Image (spheres, rainbow, N blue to C red):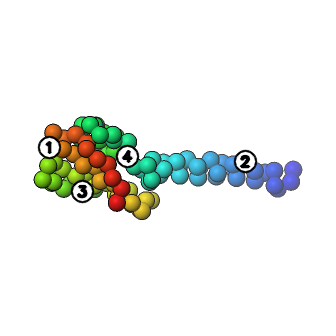
Amino acid sequence: MPDCYRSAPRRIGLLALAAALLSGCAGYGLGGPDVPPGTPRATVLARVGQPARSVALPEGERLQYSFQPAGQVAWMVDLDHNGQVVACTRR
């Protein structure tokens, strides 16, 4: 059997592995965390995890998520005084 046929399964396996790894990064790179307005703080933490930093705001709290080193952006999830999402922005 020629060598090119023996290496094909290996190439396919490596491509599948690369696709799986890249899909794991795609979730928060450009689209951001899936936290629409009105989402409770507990749900944000369950979906996205613990923030890199939490900052008190005059009218609530800002959860800062930095998806480094894979991403080049940080996401800010702003909560109102009731602990519900009012905005999710990329910085």
Marks 2 and 3, how far apart at CA: 44 Å
Determine if residue 52 is in view. Answer: yes
x 55%, y 47%: residue: 20
Q: Identify the mark nearer the N-term, 2 or 3.
A: 2
Contact? badges 3 and 1 (CB < 8 Å): no
The tag earlier along the polypeptide, 2 or 1, is 2
Percent x, y of residue 17: 59, 49
Earlier-in-chain disc, 4 versus 1:
4
Residue at 62%, 47% in the rendered image: 16
Question: Which tag is nearer the camera, tag 2 or tag 1?
Answer: 1
Identify the amino acid type marked 1: His
Q: Amino acid at mark 4?
A: Pro
Amino acid of disc 2: Pro
Disc on the earlier residue, 2 or 4 = 2
Residue 17 appears left or right of 65:
right
**Dot 4 and dot 3 residues touching (CB under 8 Å):** no
Give the residue displayed 72% in from the left and 47% down from the top.
Answer: 9
Cα distance between the residues tagged 2 and 4: 35 Å
How many C-alpha atoms fall within 10 Å of the one at disc 3: few (<14), some, or many (≥20)? Answer: few
Task: For mark 4, give the secondary structure.
Answer: loop
Q: How many marks?
A: 4
Which numbered marker is on residue 9?
A: 2
Per the image, the residue denoted by label 3 is 53
Q: Which residue is mark 1?
A: 81
Instruction: Please provide percent x and percent y for residue 3.
Output: 82, 56
Which x, y percent locates residue 65?
Answer: 31, 54
Depth check: 41 or 89 in front? 89
Q: CA distance from mark 4 to mark 3?
A: 15 Å
